[in-house]
Image (tube, grey):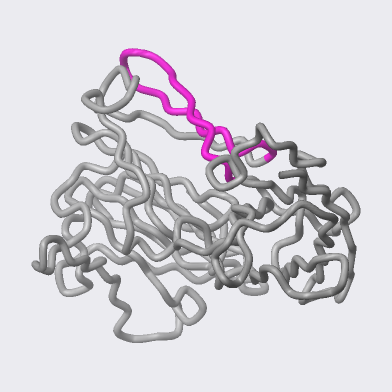
Amino acid sequence: MVIGSDGTKWISSYEQGFIGFKESGNSFLIKKIANEEDNMPTDYVTALAIDKRNQLWIGTFRGLRVLYNTTNFFEANNVRVDDIIITEDGIAKELLFQQIISDIEVDGSNNKWIGTVGAGIFYLSSNGQNTIYHFTTANSPLPSNEITDISIDESNGRVYIATPNGLVSFRSGSSGTRETLQAAHVYPNPVRPQFNITEDRVKIKDISENINIKITDIEGNLVAEAQSKINLRYRGYNLEIDGGTAYWNGKNLANNVVKSGVYLVMLSDLDTFETKVLKLMVVR
């Protein structure tokens, strides 16, 4: 069971699909989605997760579904869930078709960790269109391809993965956002010559959820810029935001590694208008 931001309780079941339950004054609303006409592959629901856009991700005994519009779930007459269609080798396919899904977790950047029974664990982009990682026993220390549980420590981005044969963890680099910019900091600082800035990247940590980041040189020339929900991690940007942490590969707008000098990291919360400026020294 998961609880949405509006107080709706979403409940999985073995024979009744998934059920929405919401109190309304002295009465309550209840509705279930379980049938093929609702685009459910089975009425056996094994996992639920509400993401940061208030979308409901539904794991079943026969694949994955998403309820994109949870707001009017009780009022709408023809509620349907959607499968996710991806292109693989030029062929359109349903994501996780017929897979037994055991768990779904959402990380600080709204990406999805999805555990399966038999196919290991998938780390998907926020919309499910890109597979960032797919861990199995063949390519990782995962002790079993049967995933029983996933848990994320949002303070440091470490993902804990439980299997019948033991527990492993993975440091994803994602982290939860902060309410304010008070604790925001940048590291390593200074960036020394032995630090591989393009690969290991400078981290701007403990930032808020909806933020704009500009990096300039000491003279005010723009070097890099990113915004939450646009410049997401794993999309190839020089400056990327992943939940509560931003990553800069040290390159400027011309895609060249910057010279030695002092750089200003200017943070601006787009909701509260709070701002903060951090100084970063780069030594080449």
Given residues 73 and 251, the one toward you in this image is 251
Given residues 204 and 215, the one toward you in this image is 215
Q: Is residue 241 above or below residue 80?
A: above
Given residues 202 and 263, the one toward you in this image is 263
Q: Is residue 158 above or below residue 125?
A: above
The location of residue 66, given as percent across then percent down, is: 34, 65
Left or right relative to 64: residue 41: left
State the predominant SS element of the stretch in magenta: strand
Name the residue located 89 percent from the left edge and 70 percent from the top edge.
Answer: 274
Q: Which residues are magenta?
A: 155-174
The location of residue 156, given as percent across then percent down, is: 66, 36
Quarter of image, res 134? top left
Name the residue located 47 percent from the left edge and 46 percent from the top edge.
Answer: 105
Quadrant housing the C terminus: top right
Asked if the stretch drawn in magenta spans residue 62, the answer is no
Q: Is residue 104 above or below residue 32?
A: above
The location of residue 204, given as percent across then percent down, is: 73, 51
Name the residue located 80 percent from the left edge and 66 percent from the top edge.
Answer: 217
